[in-house]
Image (tube, rainbow, N blue to C red):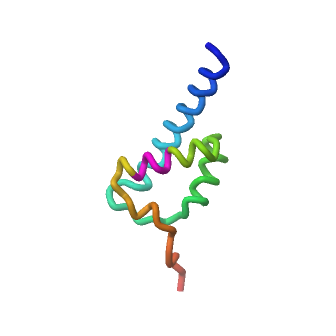
Amino acid sequence: MTRSEELSRKAADERRRCLDWLLPFMKDGQPKLATKDELRTVAMRDLGVSKSSFDFAWIDAIERTGRQDWYEPLRGRLREH
């Protein structure tokens, strides 16, 4: 396997792992409780994925779930009273 093929396979694996991780957050009308940046930080730390892999998986997850609202910034965080 060439270096290019190896890198391509690694990137595809990162995107797939990240997609699998993101889908439960977005499916079935789940409320949006974290920002894209917050989720990206956790994914990069816990899954060991690159920023680019996360960003590709983010778009893929939104398109697969039909949750276009996830493209919008998180507004009005819930506050404890």
Residue 8: quadrant of the picture: top right
| Rendering coords of residue 46 (x, y %) | 63, 45
Q: Looking at the figure, which quarter contains the N terminus?
A: top right
| Rendering coords of residue 55 (x, y %) | 55, 48
Residue depicted at 60% across the width and 60% down the height: 38
In the displayed structure, 68 sits above or below 43; it is below
Residue numbers of the magenta segment: 57-62
| Rendering coords of residue 61 (x, y %) | 43, 48
Residue depicted at 44% across the width and 55% down the height: 25
Position of residue 8 in the picture relative to residue 66 (left or right): right
Residue 30: quadrant of the picture: bottom left
Residue depicted at 53% across the width and 38% down the height: 15
Q: Is residue 59 magenta?
A: yes
Q: How many marks?
A: 0
Foreground: 28 or 74?
Answer: 74
Residue furthest toward the bottom?
Answer: 81
In the displayed structure, 78 sits above or below 39; it is below
Residue furthest toward the top?
Answer: 1
Q: Is residue 40 magenta?
A: no
**Magenta stretch, main secondary structure class:** helix
In the displayed structure, 60 sits above or below 34; it is above
Residue depicted at 60% across the width and 29% down the height: 10
Foreground: 53 or 77?
Answer: 53
Foreground: 49 or 4?
Answer: 4
| Rendering coords of residue 32 (x, y %) | 45, 65
